[in-house]
Amino acid sequence: MKITKVEPIRVHSYLLVQVHTDKGVTGLGESGTWSHLEASEAALAKFGEYLTGQDPFRIEHHWNVMYRSGCFRGSAIMGAISALDIALWDIKGKALGVPIYELLGGQTRQKVRVYVHVKAPTLEEQVQKCREALQQGYTAVGHLNPFLDEERSAPYFKTHAAKIGGAVEAVRQYRAAVGDEVDLCLEIHRRLELAEAIALGREIEPYRPFFYEDPIRPESIDAMAEVAQKVGVPIATGERFFSLHEFQLLLARNAAQYLRPSPCVVGGISGTKKVAALAEAYQKSIVPHNPGILSPVATAACLHIGASIPNLAIQEYSGGEDRPPASEIVRSQARIEQGFMLVPEGPGLGVELAPGCQEKHPPRKREIGARLHEDGSVMDQ
């Protein structure tokens, strides 16, 4: 079998890729660099020149060629490598007639526990959505931002006391709404400075969050380690990392309890499995990153990884894959039962690109912009 064509596919807000072979077997993958899809698409085309004519089964070899052939890397490059890696695993599974998890050592679990996104611009709406998630059978909610999901156009200002006090009150209300029947996965979106992150982390300890994700910008692993060492809430981070070596530094400094590799950025299924194995040696767990900006292709990749590793903590799930545009991108959807997602049983990924999806959902450009503080400086949200 030989690769005959690498086809980047822009549909809605997603960058997918199809890898075609001379045997009629086609693999599907996705790049997760959603802020810079144009750059990642160019990288896909360039790597496609190398892959054309190659044996698609040599996944690890091709991964190393693409990763090590140039001196410079970054999220756009790693997004392309990730998409192609996922597509090659899809081809191999289809050609051999087995799900990808079988190629990764078989199942360690038959279903994957998920946390569903809860997003709203007001605390009242957030609390109500937490209650609704409980009623729907979910045992965990996430993307749960105690600073709310406000419009980025509004300048931001609060005193330290009001900022921390309001966030603590939000977490208190989340816990009161769902009791101990639902775990709270708090997502801070890098919103805090170091001192603020420590102050808030200490005050929310009584409400037993599952984890405290990205309280500060993740670029400084030493700063994240200081937060982890000074608060009693488990830290989760890593969704912005695009190499195994960044995770190694995170583990060596004991800067997080939960690692958040994004399969569509960190090197695909191959890259994520390596991060999981490294974390296992440190007795740390994996929470694969899978935001709503990614398609059901990414979800399927996460599920095969989660099914095959021993140290999966929980899987992020944005919800909405049963509605357009996500429901019209692929022909099959993963099923959810009582807060668990069933692993696809078909060969390869278990999902196929839906005919005509590009025409129905043309590409959307993501504009560059940031929310500002009241004084005009840039803030993270």
Image: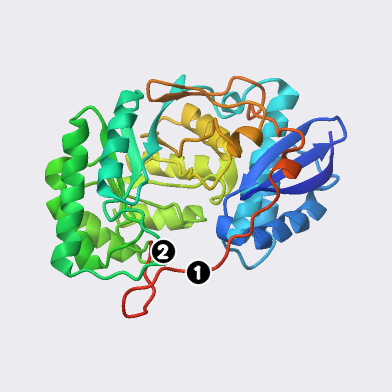
Q: Position of residue 138 (x, y in %)?
A: 34, 27
Identity of the residue drawn at 88% across and 34% down: 22
Near mark 2 (Cα within 10 A), the count class, few <14, some 14-19 or many ≥20, is some
What's the amino acid at mark 2? Answer: Arg
List the single residue furthest toward the bottom. 375
| Front label number (1 vs 2) | 2
Q: Which residue is mark 1?
A: 369
Q: Which residue is mark 2?
A: 152
Identity of the residue drawn at 31% across and 24% down: 135
Q: Position of residue 312 (x, y in %)?
A: 40, 33
Q: Are marks 1 and 2 in contact (CB under 8 Å)?
A: yes
**In the rendering, which numbered label is found on residue 41?**
none
Residue nearest the viewer, comparing 321 with 271? 321
Q: Position of residue 314 (x, y in %)?
A: 38, 34
Identity of the residue drawn at 26% across and 34% down: 183
Residue 154 visible to an observer of this rendering: yes
Secondary structure beneath label 2: loop
Near mark 1 (Cα within 10 A), the count class, few <14, some 14-19 or many ≥20, is few
What's the amino acid at mark 1? Answer: Gly
Q: Image quadrant of residue 287?
A: top left
- State the CA–CA distance, disc 1 to disc 2: 9 Å
